[in-house]
Each structure stands twice: as structure tokens, then as C-alpha cells.
């Protein structure tokens, strides 16, 4: 019985510490879910710390981060009387991060560029016509661009020996768009 508070002493059941890969506390939403997956409590951890001091019997789940950006889930958490449990959570960098912050007003567009036969086109280039930004595909034909919300974005995908492919993309608001692009030989 050592360490168990006697005479009705208060304790906080769970503390969650959310950090980046370098150990720095980062802001993130943190949720406590019951065994059926229903939301019990949601805290926005401004400094990377969230407390869930009291919850019912049974096992719970803690989810930190945003689903579209590598959220982390810890399962099978139960209140242990008199014990302050600590769950450190490290959120990996988000693919949408720009200077440490999420791209707030747009969509990430993940393109997979291939030729007519399905072979990857590693020398493909993606050009955003409205701002002339260019992105090169990697050796697997993969490229990522960011487009603004509520604006029609005109994109050209080109590669040596292939005809240009024109795309008109519309972002409705902070979504991930995955798009295969087939280039025809010239």
C-alpha cells in the first residue's frame, strides 16, 4: 500500500506529453476515447501537455495529433488509483509542415507519375502555372505539391519524351489528394 494516497488525497490519473522528434513540446489535439471509441474528453495541448485527471472504469485510448498528419494512439489505459501515469508521445514531423507549422489554408497533392504502360517516370516535373513553382518527381515518379483552398490550381506535368499533361485541381479545404498521372509518349 506504499505510495497510495490515503484519506482522500487527490491525484491526476494521466498526463500526456506531446513532443516533436527533438523533444520540444508541441501544440496538438489530444483525445481520451472509451473502449467503444467514443470521445470522452478532448484537450488542445497548447504547450504539449494534456491531463486527464478522472475517468470511469475500464480501458481507454489516448490519441494525439491529427489523423491526416501521423497521429499516435496509445491503447489499454486504465485509471490506477493513486498513481499519476505519464505517457510521453513523440509526433513525427508532418509531411505538410512548413517552417514547423501546418499549411493552414490548402491541400497537399501527392502525385504518382507513370507512362502509358505503368512504368514510373522519374524525370517528371510538376509546374504550378499560377505561381511558376516547380517540383521534381523522385526516382519512383512521386511528387508532392501544396495548393491553396478555394482556388482552381492549374498544373502541368511534363517529362522529356512525353506529352505535357494539364490538370485543374480544386482544394475544398485541408484535405489530402492522391492522384495518379499517366503521361503519353510523344
Image: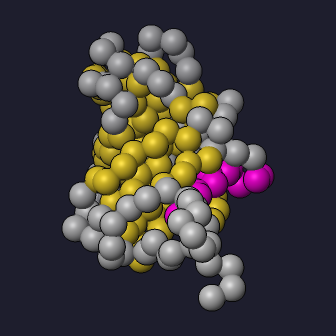
Q: Residue at x 28, y 71 (%)?
A: 35
Say left or right for 3 vs 80: right
In the displayed structure, 120 sits above or below 146; it is below
Q: Which residue is drawn at 65% across and 38% down?
A: 47
Q: What stretch is highlighted in magenta?
A: 13-23
Q: Give the percent coordinates (x, y) of residue 64.
A: 49, 53
Q: Residue at x 55, y 48 (%)?
A: 50
Q: Give the percent coordinates (x, y) of residue 33.
A: 33, 60
Q: Is residue 14 magenta?
A: yes
Residue 25 showing in the rendered view: yes
Residue 125 showing in the rendered view: no
**Residue placed furthest toward the bottom:** 1
Front in this rendered view, residue 91 or 170: 91
Say left or right for 153 vs 134: left
User: In which quadrant of the rendered image does the N terminus lie?
Assistant: bottom right
Q: Which residue is drawn at 46% across and 43% down?
A: 43
Mark count: 0
Q: Is residue 158 magenta?
A: no
Residue 40, by quadrant, is bottom left
Say left or right for 101 vs 179: right
Front in this rendered view, residue 88 or 129: 88
Residue 175, by quadrant, is top left
Q: Give the percent coordinates (x, y) of residue 77.
A: 45, 73
User: In which quadrant of the rendered image does the C terminus lie?
Assistant: top left
Say left or right for 158 vs 27: left
Front in this rendered view, residue 40 or 133: 40
**Residue placed furthest toward the front:** 7
In the displayed structure, 3 sits above or below 24; it is below
Q: Give the percent coordinates (x, y) of residue 25.
A: 70, 45
Here the colouring is: secondary structure
Front in this rendered view, residue 82 or 147: 82
In the displayed structure, 163 sits above or below 153; it is below
Amino acid at each position: 500500500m506504499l505510495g497510495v494516497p490515503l484519506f482522500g488525497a487527490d491525484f491526476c490519473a494521466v498526463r500526456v506529453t506531446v513532443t516533436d522528434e527533438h523533444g520540444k513540446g508541441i501544440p496538438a489535439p489530444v483525445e481520451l476515447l472509451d473502449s467503444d471509441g467514443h470521445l470522452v474528453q478532448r484537450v488542445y495541448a497548447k504547450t504539449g501537455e494534456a491531463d486527464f485527471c478522472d475517468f470511469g472504469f475500464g480501458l481507454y485510448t489516448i490519441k494525439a495529433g491529427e489523423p491526416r498528419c501521423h497521429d499516435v494512439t496509445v491503447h489499454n489505459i486504465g485509471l490506477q488509483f493513486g498513481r499519476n501515469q505519464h505517457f510521453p508521445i513523440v509526433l513525427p514531423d508532418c509531411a505538410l509542415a512548413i517552417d514547423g507549422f501546418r499549411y493552414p489554408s490548402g491541400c497537399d497533392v501527392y502525385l504518382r507519375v507513370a507512362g502509358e504502360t505503368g512504368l514510373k517516370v522519374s524525370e517528371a516535373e510538376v509546374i504550378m502555372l499560377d505561381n511558376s513553382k516547380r517540383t521534381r518527381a523522385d526516382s519512383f515518379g512521386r511528387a508532392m505539391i501544396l495548393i491553396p483552398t478555394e482556388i482552381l490550381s492549374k498544373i502541368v506535368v511534363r517529362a522529356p519524351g512525353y506529352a505535357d499533361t494539364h490538370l485543374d485541381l480544386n482544394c475544398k479545404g485541408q484535405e489530402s489528394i492522391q492522384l495518379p498521372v499517366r503521361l503519353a509518349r510523344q
